[in-house]
Structures are given as structure tokens and as C-alpha cells.
Image (cartoon, rainbow, N blue to C red):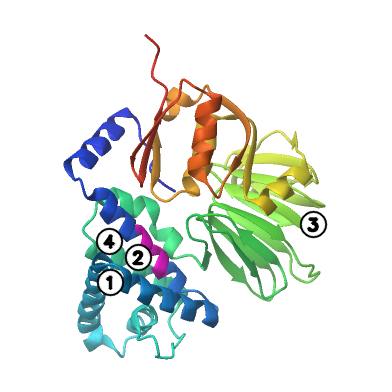
């Protein structure tokens, strides 16, 4: 989801930080404002009202917060004026409703007539057009597909939902899914991040998880699905599933069966080798918000920590690929996790350039 820069990109980023001393302050306020926007669009009425109270308190806590909110509200006003002449058009109403949902007065009852997708689009527009911060930070922290998703979790937060069919889904940090339920099937599209699923039985409607790399059809109950840049990783905790890569689906090839305590990595071109896993340790890791890795490359570990940390962890993937990690790291305290990595690999250099920018490298010795 976030910036993974090579050396040249990192140099320009660090120069930008040096040139603008207040960049970390602006970034922090943008991060907080974006989190409030996500929370203000929650489906649950009580959660939205609690978020509205928190947003109001946040604005009052610091003049800079109030200034940021004023910028956003000013942009909302401009959009309303531009849309005013188009009120009778269908595509105008969802946007107007989304704006009202985010910036209505605290005592005003919300009207949930706007689509979630319109709301996410408007939130992205507000962040992109009305906030004067480096574009790379806003777009990397909150990409469009994340803000448009039907269900998403904020950075550093875990979210559990019970879907309409009784399926229980837990999203870890900065994860997002779209739901496509109809009379014939239940489909969940994993947009980004990682989810834990406890699938409810419904003989008349199969449950399918879809990603860019392929699909997973549930034949049982409990499993974890995670998205990487070019792959989907499935970890089975209970029962079994059918897995088809995008290529297998096109060629109408048979599915691969993955059973409990097994893991596979799926790319668009096919299914990797089946690996054995400790299903109980994975379940415990989700319960206690831990990252359990065994002989994984350091960039993979940093990717996972990056998704649980506000801002970005910047590094040269090729330079760190050869470092293998086996560890249990706390996901609720990524600063501590980075310290543990540094203790295990003393040649690593971890520099906190700002609260929202960490640079990791491994300089060659003298």
C-alpha cells in the first residue's frame, strides 16, 4: 500500500524532508484527518456518532486541526456549489449525500442515502485537492481503491464484522474488501491487506474470495487470506478450500485443494508449492496482534510492519532481500518491532527521519 522506494527515490524523499521542516507536522494532521473521514463513514450509527464527537473534539484540540477541517469544509462548499445545478441528476445525489454524511452538524441526523463508493471518492478528492502536503504521502497512505472499498480498517487498527449471512470477517491494519452477494453466490473481493474468515455455511450459495491473482472457494470454515504486490497468500486453519489461479480459470483447469495447516502462494500464473504451517500459532498471532515469521526475507517483514504503521517505511528491496528473518514481532507497536529487528541484525541502520518516515538500510562495512 505504501511507498517502497529505491535509493534514488529515498534520496529525494530525505531532501524533501530536510527542505520542509514542518512536513512531519502536516503529515500527522493529514493522517489524523483521513482516519476521521474513514471512521465517519462507518455503517454502524453508534460508531458514526462516536466518530463525529471525536472529530469535533479533535478540531477543538489544536488550531491546526481546526484549520485543516476548515480547508476540507471549504472544499465541500465549493463542490456543493458546483453540484447545485445538477441536483436532479442521479450521479449528483450520492456525492451530495456523502458530503453531508462527513460534515453534517453533530446534532443532525445522518441520511444514509449516498453510496459507500461515492463517499470514498469524495473523501479522496478532499484529501487530494484541499490539503497542501506532499502528494506521494497522501496517495501512498490512502489510495483510491482503499477509500472506495465497502469495508476497510484504519492504519494500526483491527476490525471485525459479521456479514449478512453470518460469516465473520476480521481485517487487520489498512485492509479493505468489497462484497458481492446475490441469490446465487457470496463473493468477497480482497482489495488489499489481510483478513481472517470464519465462513458461515450456506449450501445454496458458495463463498468465494477473489483477488487479482485468482479465487478461493470455501469448502469449510476458517482461513486467512493476504494480498502482496503480485501474489495472494492463503493460510488454512480449519477444513479446506479450492484454489484457482487466474490462468487456471481462463483455461478451465482443475482446482488445487488446500487443507488445514497448509499454506500456498498464488500468482496470476499458477499455484505455488503447498507448505506446512502451524495453524494454532497463526490463530494466536491474530488473537494477540503479532507477526509470526519463519525464514522470510526482511522486505516481506517490513511490508507487513509498514501496513501497521502510520506513514511509510522506506528501503531498497534488492539490497535487503538476502536477509532472512524468523521472529515474533508486535504489530500494535511497530517501533518496538523495528528495535527488535535492529537487535537481531546489528548491521541494519534504522533512521526515524520524522514520525511518518522511517528509512531502513544496511550500509556496507568499512
Q: Which residue is mark 1?
A: 69
Q: Which residue is mark 4?
A: 128
Q: Are marks 2 and 3 in contact (CB under 8 Å)?
A: no
In the picture, measured across the screen, residue 222 lies left or right of residue 109, that is: right
Query: Badge 4: few (under 14), some or many (20 or more) residues near its Cα, within 10 Å?
Result: some
How far is mark 2 from mark 1, CA to CA? 8 Å
Q: Are marks 2 and 1 in contact (CB under 8 Å)?
A: yes
Q: Which residue is mark 3?
A: 219
Q: Secondary structure at mark 4?
A: helix
| Residue 33: assigned label | 2
How far is mark 2 from mark 3, CA to CA? 41 Å
Q: Earlier in the sequence, mark 4 or mark 2?
A: 2
Q: Earlier in the sequence, mark 3 or mark 1?
A: 1
Q: Which of the 4 quarters of the picture holds residue 188? A: bottom right
In the rendered view, tell whether residue 66 sits above or below residue 5.
below
- Residue depth check, mark 3 versus mark 4: number of the one nearer the observer: 4
Q: Earlier in the sequence, mark 2 or mark 3?
A: 2
**Residue at (81% x, 46% y) in the render:** 260
How far is mark 4 from mark 2, CA to CA? 12 Å
**Residue at (24% x, 65% y) in the render:** 64
- Residue depth check, mark 1 versus mark 4: number of the one nearer the observer: 1
Query: Badge 1: few (under 14), some or many (20 or more) residues near its Cα, within 10 Å?
Result: many
**Residue at (29% x, 48% y) in the render:** 136
Q: Earlier in the sequence, mark 3 or mark 4?
A: 4
First to last magenta residue range: 31-37
How far is mark 3 from mark 4, CA to CA? 42 Å
Amino acid at each position: 500500500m505504501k511507498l517502497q522506494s529505491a535509493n534514488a527515490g529515498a534520496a529525494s524523499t530525505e531532501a524533501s524532508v530536510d527542505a520542509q521542516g514542518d512536513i512531519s507536522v502536516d503529515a500527522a494532521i493529514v493522517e489524523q484527518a483521513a482516519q476521521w473521514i474513514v471512521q465517519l463513514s462507518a455503517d454502524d450509527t453508534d460508531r458514526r456518532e462516536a466518530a463525529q464527537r471525536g472529530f469535533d473534539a479533535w478540531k477543538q484540540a489544536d488550531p491546526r486541526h481546526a484549520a485543516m477541517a476548515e480547508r476540507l469544509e471549504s472544499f465541500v462548499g465549493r463542490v456543493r456549489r458546483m453540484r447545485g445545478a445538477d441536483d436532479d441528476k442521479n450521479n449528483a445525489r450520492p456525492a451530495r449525500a456523502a458530503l453531508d454524511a462527513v460534515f453534517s452538524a453533530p446534532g443532525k441526523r445522518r441520511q444514509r442515502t449516498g453510496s459507500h463508493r461515492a463517499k470514498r471518492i469524495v473523501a479522496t478528492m478532499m484529501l487530494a485537492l484541499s490539503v497542501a502536503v506532499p502528494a506521494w504521502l497522501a496517495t501512498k497512505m490512502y489510495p483510491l481503491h482503499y477509500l472506495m472499498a465497502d469495508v476497510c480498517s484504519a492504519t494500526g487498527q483491527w476490525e471485525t464484522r459479521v456479514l449478512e449471512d453470518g460469516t465473520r470477517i476480521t481485517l487487520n491494519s489498512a485492509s479493505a474488501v468489497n462484497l458481492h452477494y446475490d441469490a446465487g453466490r457470496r463473493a468477497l473481493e480482497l482489495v488489499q491487506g489481510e483478513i481472517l474468515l470464519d465462513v458461515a455455511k450456506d449450501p445454496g450459495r458458495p463463498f468465494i474470495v477473489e483477488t487479482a491473482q485468482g479465487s478461493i472457494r470455501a469448502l469449510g470454515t476458517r482461513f486467512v487470506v493476504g494480498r502482496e504486490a503480485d501474489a495472494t497468500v492463503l493460510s488454512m486453519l480449519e477444513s479446506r478450500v479450492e484454489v484457482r489461479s487466474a490462468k487456471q480459470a481462463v483455461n478451465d483447469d482443475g482446482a488445487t485443494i488446500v487443507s488445514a495447516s497448509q499454506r500456498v502462494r498464488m500468482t496470476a500464473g499458477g499455484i505455488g508449492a503447498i507448505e506446512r504451517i502451524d495453524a494454532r500459532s497463526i490463530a494466536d498471532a491474530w488473537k494477540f496482534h503479532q507477526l509470526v515469521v519463519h525464514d522470510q526475507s526482511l522486505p516481506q517483514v517490513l511490508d507487513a510492519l509498514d501496513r501497521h504503521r502510520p506513514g511509510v517505511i522506506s528501503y531498497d528491496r534488492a539490497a535487503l532481500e538476502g536477509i532472512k528473518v524468523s521472529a515474533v514481532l508486535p504489530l500494535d507497536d511497530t517501533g518496538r518491532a523495528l528495535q527488535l529487528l535492529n537487535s537481531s541484525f546489528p548491521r541494519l541502520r534504522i533512521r526515524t527521519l520524522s514520525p511518518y518516515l522511517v528509512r531502513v538500510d544496511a550500509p556496507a562495512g568499512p
